[in-house]
Image (cartoon, grey):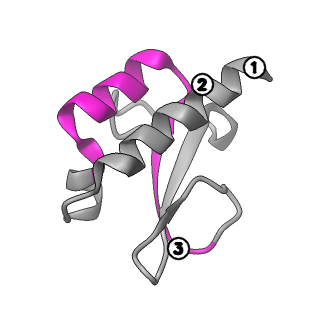
Amino acid sequence: MCIACREMKTKEELLRIIKQKDGSFTFNPKAMGRGAYVCRSQECVQLCMKKKLLNRAYKTNIDETVYKQLLEEYAGLDKD
């Protein structure tokens, strides 16, 4: 389920943001760790950034660089 629009979608339609044991974040869908999902749409990525939804999903303060990485990851998908 997307944390922004709350719609159920297939894993192929979602970006997975993983919090690893060391506290770092990655966007590798195969990586181990706790994951949150965001639709591969500009609206959902922007809403996630605007409302800082990763903070809520992980119940911690997420650094702004993680949100910037999310935007870059989304932008990289447009090129594929």
59 to 40, vertically: above or below: below
- Disc 3 is placed on an element classified as loop
Task: Decide if residue 9 is in sight here.
Answer: no
Residue 69: x and y, percent? 49, 43
Q: Quadrant of residue 53?
A: top left
Residue depicted at 29% across the width and 25% down the height: 47
19 to 11, vertically: above or below: below
Q: Which residues are magenta?
A: 32-54
Q: Residues within 10 Å of mark 3 (few under 14, many from 20)?
A: some
Which residue position holds label 3?
33
Residue 59 within the magenta-colored segment of the rendering: no
Decide which of tag 3 and tag 1 comes sooner along the chain: 3
- The image's mark for residue 75 is 2
Q: CA distance from mark 2 to mark 3?
A: 24 Å
- Disc 2 marks a residue whose amino acid type is Ala
Q: Nearer the viewer, residue 63 or 18?
A: 63
Taking the image as shown, residue 34 lies to the left or right of residue 55, namely right
Residue 17: x and y, percent? 50, 53
Residue depicted at 48% across the width and 32% down the height: 71
Q: CA distance from mark 2 to mark 1?
A: 7 Å
Residue 64: x and y, percent? 30, 47
